[in-house]
Image: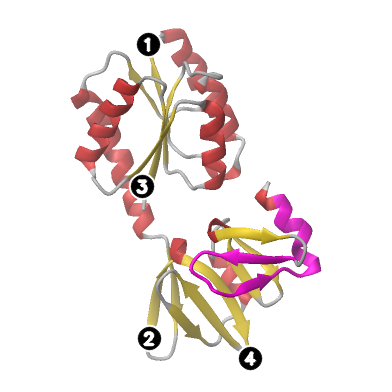
């Protein structure tokens, strides 16, 4: 599901933008916060498709937040739209953050809707294409990548566990699958790949992971402990 993060400290403006987005597509996941620091934390935890940032926020500026987002590899080209009422801030943001566009206060709903519609439609289309295609003898499995919880290799077979299904496949390796997965996935053992978005607990005493919807615990080998902690910081 496509995600939009709105960072705006005025409730009326937040509600107006949410209303416009819902009119474009009611299935979009909309996340809101009033603080730049909180927005940065959310952005690290989740994969945001579009940012709508007010330039004047409670803790620090939307321009600074935009710069921090651009420093994260996964958001180098993600659309960032600023909300502003000052022309000089617009120019600064264009130069420093490479923003997609501006919403100028006070704004008209139709103008904002016209601006947001193509961005949202594009993110929805990209979301639909974010699948793992596994070809077997008689079947091709189309598996939504963001629903994969973990992947395990056992006795020359690969088992892919999603939120709702389990797939058994042959003639694949974990190395090959890692090339087709996105940055949310990490190796934690020579026979296991996990989706870090589904980690619910890390037991550092026994070095095992607990994942959403999975009853068993996943061991972390010595080789991957340090890398795991670096990726989750």
Marks 2, 4: nearer the viewer: 4
The segment highlighted magenta reads: 207-230
Tell me the CA gap for discs 1 and 4.
62 Å
Of marks 1 and 3, which one's residue comes earlier in the chain? 1
Q: Is residue 47 left or right of residue 128?
A: right
Q: Is residue 103 left or right of residue 99?
A: left
Tell me the CA gap for discs 2 and 4.
21 Å
Q: Are marks 1 and 4 in contact (CB under 8 Å)?
A: no
SS for dot 1:
loop
**The quarter of the displayed image where residue 52 is located:** top left
Rendered view: 206 above or below 78? below
Q: Is residue 11 visible?
A: yes
Marks 2, 1: nearer the viewer: 1
Residue at 37% from the left image edge and 60% from the top image edge: 129
SS for dot 2:
loop
SS for dot 4:
loop
Position in image of residue 86 (x %, y %): 41, 9
Residue at 36% from the left image edge and 47% from the top image edge: 123
Of marks 3 and 4, which one's residue comes earlier in the chain? 3
Residue highlighted by disc 4: 155
Residue at 44% from the left image edge and 15% from the top image edge: 90
Of marks 1 and 4, which one's residue comes earlier in the chain? 1
Residue highlighted by disc 1: 85
**The quarter of the displayed image where residue 192 is located:** bottom right
Residue highlighted by disc 2: 139
Whether 210 is among the magenta residues is: yes
């Amino acid at each position: 599901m496509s995600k939009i993060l709105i960072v705006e400290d005025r409730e009326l403006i937040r509600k107006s933008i949410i209303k416009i987005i819902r009119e474009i597509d009611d299935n979009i996941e909309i996340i809101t916060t009033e603080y730049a620091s909180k927005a940065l934390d959310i952005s690290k935890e989740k994969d945001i498709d579009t940012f709508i940032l007010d330039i004047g926020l409670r803790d620090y500026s939307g321009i600074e937040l935009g710069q921090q987002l651009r420093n994260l590899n996964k958001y180098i080209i993600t659309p960032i739209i600023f909300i502003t009422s000052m022309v000089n801030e617009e120019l600064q943001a264009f130069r420093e953050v490479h923003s997609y566009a501006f919403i100028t206060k006070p704004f008209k709903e139709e103008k904002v809707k016209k601006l947001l519609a193509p961005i949202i439609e594009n993110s929805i289309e990209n979301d639909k294409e974010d699948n793992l295609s596994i070809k077997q003898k008689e079947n091709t499995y189309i598996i939504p990548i963001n629903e994969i919880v973990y992947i395990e290799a056992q006795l020359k077979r690969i088992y892919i566990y999603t939120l709702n299904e389990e797939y058994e496949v042959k003639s694949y390796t974990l190395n090959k699958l890692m090339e087709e997965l996105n940055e949310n996935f990490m190796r934690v053992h020579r026979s296991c790949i996990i989706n870090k978005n589904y980690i619910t607990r890390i037991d550092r005493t026994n070095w095992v992971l607990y994942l959403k919807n999975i009853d068993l615990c996943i061991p972390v080998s010595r080789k991957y402990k340090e890398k795991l902690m670096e990726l989750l910081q």
